[in-house]
Amino acid sequence: MSITLTRDLPVRSSAAAIAPVQDRWYSEKRLGGLSRFAFAITVLNLLGHAFLGFEQSWLTPFVALAAAYGTELVGETVDARLNHRATRYAGSLTSLIKFLLPAHISGLAVGMLLYAAENTVAIAFAASAAMASKYAFRVASAVDRDGQPIFRHFLNPSNFGITVTLLLFPTVGIAPPYQFTENTSGIVDWILPLIIVCSGSYLNIKATGRIPLIVAWLLAFVSQAAVRSLLHGSALVASCLPMTGFAFILFTFYMITDPATSPSRTSTQISFAVAVAGFYGVLMELHVVFGLFYALTIVTAGRGIGLLLTARSRRDAGGLPLRRSEVAASTGIR
């Protein structure tokens, strides 16, 4: 299923394609951010399998990458032919590498965070589902200078791939938290998380502008933990224990802050973070495991539906078609 607003948005002038000043990720910072993230997650996977103690086999990341690359290339090829345009990976090796950076990140993230033992089919499914979601679940939020719709996916790819795999493969779970520091001890157990926090903070300050989201997410997570602790008379430390895990740090600095599927305005970043923490708390009360991933999928899906409904209400009211900046201002989706 592809959710698109193309038929609802008449062609606009070139002015509609100009991104708002508040959000320059796609026009100025996207390539730099993706390159840094791809490098960081590649190094982490190499160190993890060679030294840290990753439980997955060495075959796992290669299977995930092959599935992610293949799905991304097929999706782009089909989409380009349907829309009578050139593929974004054509022209040079550099173009191909730039195009595959998101698939590289999602593939390694899926292979690193899921544990499927010898079931590499499940890993391949997760990576393929992650990349396919970019084409199946997206909205056309504006038009470019040529009058063509600008499509934006609204589900976090790697998070979605992990979510559907956990739901469909009962024997697959999340990688054990200890695998990131299984073979380390002493000061190294503090240095590794510190590196992730510092590198993630740098990336989100320089490239994504999602520091308000991170701060709001951490505060909201502690708040929902405090509420559950009061309700059940349990220790607050126990409710906050997930925050000490390496996977939580990765989720906080590299997944929930995905600039393509999270809002850019400060106020909507805060609302987004509070919503994810709130749904996590509800899922915990319902005794649903893997709540972090399910909560983020629910909230990002809600944002996509919100954009669709907002545009349709504008159309039904007889208003002008939405510019890119108007869509962002009315929904917080940029």
Image (cartoon, helix red, strand yellow):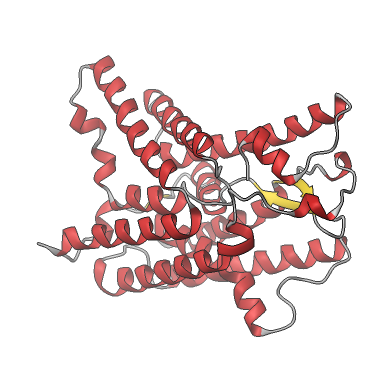
Identify the image quadrant of the N terminus. Answer: top right
Q: Residue furthest left?
A: 186
- Residue in front for this viewpoint, 144 or 36: 144
For the question of whether residue 22 can be seen, the reply is yes
Question: Which quadrant would residue 315 be assigned to in this image?
Answer: top right
Give the side of residue 263 with respect to residue 273, left or right: right
> Where, by quadrant of the figure, is residue 69 drawn?
bottom right
- Please identify the residue farthest to the bottom as the structure is shown: 92
Number of numbered discs overlaid on the protein picture: 0
* Residue beneath the point at 55% across and 55% down: 126
The residue lying toward the viewer, choosing from 230 and 121, is 230
**In terms of image quadrants, where is residue 14?**
bottom right
Q: Is residue 23 left or right of residue 85?
A: left
Q: Does 8 sit above or below residue 101?
A: above
Q: Is residue 116 left or right of residue 193?
A: right
> Residue 210, relative to residue 100: is it above or below?
above
**Image quarter (top left, top right, bottom left or bottom right) of the C terminus:** top right
Q: What residue do we see at 60% from left, 77% from top?
A: 97
Residue at point 37%, 69% (across, down)? 45
Q: Is residue 1 left or right of residue 230?
A: right
The percent position of residue 82, horizontal first and vertical second, equals 87, 61
Q: Nearer the viewer, residue 112 or 40?
A: 40
List x then y, in percent, for residue 117. 39, 59
Judge whether 152 appears above or below 118 on screen.
above
Residue 291 percent across, percent down from the top left: 42, 36
Is 12 or 99 nearer to us in this picture? 12
Q: Residue at x 81, y 42 (%)?
A: 5
Residue 307 x/y as whole percent: 70, 36
Residue 2 shows in the view: no
